[in-house]
Image (cartoon, grey):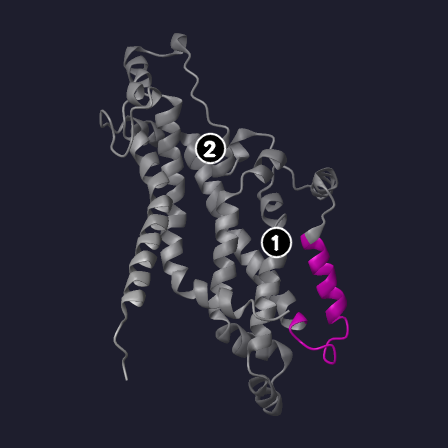
Amino acid sequence: MVKEATLGSKLFDIVLIVLLVGVSLLCILPIWYTLAVSLSENSAAAAGQVRLWPVGFNLNSYREIMDDSKFFNSFWISIQRVVLGAVVSFVVTVLMAYPLSKTTKDFRLRNILMWILVFTMLFNGGLIPWYQTVKALGLINNIWGLVLGHSVPVFNVILVVNYFRNLPKELEEAALVDGAGPWYMLVKLYIPLAVPVLATVTLFSIVYHWNEFFNGLVLMSRADHYPLQTYIQQLVVIIDASTLNTEQLKRMSELSNQTLNAAKIFIAMIPVLIVYPLLQRFFIHGITLGSVKE
């Protein structure tokens, strides 16, 4: 039987809708403002005249980006980093989470390793020892330094462990009766059933590797090895009039750090904005079921 909505419930729904719309606008407005600045003329952006709509609409910043080989080189490095990082993190996370999801009867060192993982979430060895370790492994100016530096995301491991522990034990018992081994159960049983949480932690890895800039700044000594976010963080437009012809001077006069950087930042947002909707349907389900146990 469907109960008639009371006045209080209707008011609550209205307040909730208004609140959610407000939160959505707070998330969308910075992106929209960045786009508006990137499409505005130099003087308007410098004077702070841009609000929600471009002032002096033009595409000069995007035309300049099309000629910026360093930007696309950094973009390509970030794509490689995301792909390699997501794959490595996925493999490591699954291979760590599967044995840690067992009881101490099946895996005696389970509790000890779990405490070690939790300890690493609270404390780390420090920046200098970390850098010296990466340098000793020959990973400076190497994309693997960016990938392997975050190959064991402890939070993701704990989410997957808890999700695995929530799966019905009867499925594993039935597989054991049929003669299935640990690798077969992991590949044919656990991974297919854990698609929501695995999609969620993969999304976490993708966003981390795409947005992270500090490791690139520390581990890469040359600008041509910078990932995209490190490149953007270092952006500056330096105009040397003695090396430019009349047409180039005119084009550069129409640009500024603010409009050009806004265009590059907006382009850098696009891949994540595309990936999020594709994995959104797994996100809440994966987080919820992966966080209910120790």
Residue at position x 58%, y 37% from top? Answer: 214
Query: Residue 203 or 166: which is nearer the viewer?
Result: 166
Query: The residue tagged with tag 2: helix, strand or loop?
Result: helix
| Label 2 CA crowd tier, 10 Å (few <14, some 14–19, many 20+) | some
Closer to the chain start, of discs 1 and 2, is: 1
Mark identifier at residue 151: 1
Residue at position x 58%, y 73% from top? Answer: 164
Residue 40 makes an appearance in the image = yes
- 134 horizontally vs 249: left or right: right
Residue 255, by quadrant, is top left
Pinpoint residue 140: horizontal percent, then vertical percent. Answer: 65, 38
Pinpoint residue 177: horizontal percent, then vertical percent. Answer: 61, 92
Residue at position x 25%, y 30% from top? Answer: 54
Q: List the single residue furthest toward the left.
A: 57
Q: List the single residue furthest toward the front.
A: 7
Residue at position x 50%, y 32% from top? Answer: 233
Query: The residue tagged with tag 1: helix, strand or loop?
Result: loop
Give the residue number, with chain letter if any, for mark 2: 232
Pinpoint residue 14: horizontal percent, then vertical percent. Answer: 29, 59
Residue 268, by quadrant, is top left
- Looking at the image, is 183 positioned above or below residue 21? below
Q: What are the residue bounds of the magenta stretch?
A: 100-121
Q: Is residue 14 magenta?
A: no
What type is the residue that disc 2 sits on?
Ile
What type is the residue that disc 1 sits on?
Ser
Pinpoint residue 97: horizontal percent, then vertical percent. Answer: 62, 68
Residue 81 makes an appearance in the image = no
- Looking at the image, is 111 positioned above or below residue 208? below
Placement of the C terminus among the 4 image quadrants = bottom right
Instruction: Report how far apart the C-alphas of labels 1 and 2 lie in the structure.
Output: 24 Å
